[in-house]
Amino acid sequence: MKHSCKFLHSSIGKKFTVGAAGVLLCLFLVFHLSGNMLLFVGESQFNAFANTLDTNPLIPAAEIILAAIFFAHVVVSLWLRWQNKQARPVGYADYRAKGGRTAGSRTMTWTALLVLAFLIIHVKAFRFGGRDGGMYHLVLSSLSNPYMAGFYLLALAGLALHLSHGVQSAFQTFGLNHPKYMPAVKALGWAFALIICGGFAVIPIWALIKGGL
Amino acid sequence: MNEKKKLNLTLKIWRQKGPGDAGRFVECKAENISPDASFLEMLDVVNEGLVKRGEEAIAFDSDCREGICGMCSLVINGKPHGPELGTATCQLHMRTFQDGDTITVEPFRAKAFPPVKDLVVDRSAFDRIVAAGGFVSVNTGNPQDANSILIGHAVAEKAMDAAACIGCGACVAACPNASAMLFVAAKVSHLALLPQGQPERMRRVAQMRAQMDAEGFGNCSNEYACEAACPKEISVRAIARLNREYLKASLCSEE
């Protein structure tokens, strides 16, 4: 116990926690998107799927685990970020260090905040909101609102940028960096970000079109 | 031989009387500078002028002036060791700049590198990290036969790439988080790759990591600004090795 605490408290251990939680959240995204794709199979199938989740007694437990993973990812990241701020009390007048800094890596905190704001709205509407008329109807009625759909698309763009750095960064943190495979890992990070976020983005666009934009 | 055109430059340079002083930028002229001079030689010329006028010379660190000691520092126009890749400040030539340029010169900035004076910062945090485990313990006595421990060429090259670290601290200066991971990674890698480093391998990485955190360096966010600034071009793959080594030591060490 003492040893694992020491590891988790260390700079490397904290990064490991963020990376591991990030990978689990990525897996959740895959399951979430797979479920959402039932929207395009049919109203009754999607509603039945939503109903199965709603009535499954194991789901609340799974939700608590998911919330804990998300909480660990956010809290430990903020802790690291706070320490990073402390590590340079006087900043540079001129700072042009580049290296592997990308749009994704520079904006990690901002895209994280955007996704967090999105999640609050999203969970409130779809997890704790009323489901009269079925989940399919709720998706269509919420996302056919152009402001809501626009916000969803913006948040997904933010998530894509976040993943473009996050996925390949997790590999480096786990110590997996090899000259043969790293270019492929970086491409995989982008591919995952675009496939997942592109997949989710289809839904608000579809709702807008179906809602008679 | 043709006389090369001399450079006249404006320096926007950080002056700070001591650790307690807030510090500020001061503009001064660097006139009649040979394009063949190194950046440090240019500062020597400026200092000569200052001393002649009865003003205090600009304090900066330097020692070997041939890129192998790690003593020179400076953030020049926003980049540690200046704009050239794979060179220390002492190897940066003034021909890199144009006549009439304004050059911003700042010290390496990090909480773990407290300011001493002007452009000089205290980098002894690195010494304490090395003292915590960046060594091998060997018995004294007669030197052993040169080829008694065989090391494959590829491994020797990899260890040598890491051992090229001169401990200048440019990685910390360049890192958006003032993290020392590339330095510690280079020191851990170079010994972890060699047979001589095996007996203390796990203890070394655990203790160096602990000292690194205790010094108040930031955490790595995998942005690789360190690699781009390193005068010895040490790869961030060393950081991946450090992560692996530390994970392994945390899981397997019995200490």
Image (cartoon, coloured by chain):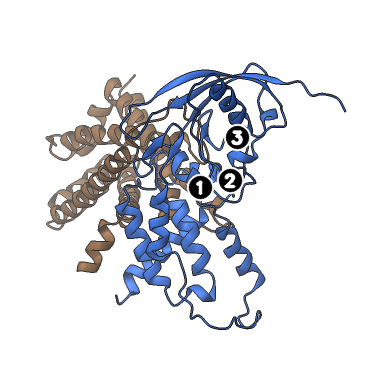
Chain colours: A brown, B blue
Marks 1 & 3, CB-CB < 8 Å contact: no
Q: Chain of mark 1?
A: B
How far across and how far down the image is residue A69, in percent? Answer: 23, 52
Residue type, numbered disc 2: Pro
Residue at 24% x, 65% y is A4
C-alpha distance separating marks 1 and 3? 15 Å
Q: Is residue A165 left or right of residue A99?
A: left
Residue type, numbered disc 1: Cys
Indicate which disc residue B22 carries: none
Secondary structure beneath label 1: loop
Marks 1 & 2, CB-CB < 8 Å contact: yes
Secondary structure beneath label 2: loop
Residue nearer the viewer, B253 or B120:
B120
Indicate which disc residue B231 carries: 2
Which quadrant holds residue A154? top left
Please name the residue that numbered disc 3 is placed on.
B40
First in sequence, mark 3 or 2: give its number: 3
Residue at 53% x, 28% y is B77
> Can residue B15 be seen by looking at this rendering?
yes
Residue type, numbered disc 3: Leu
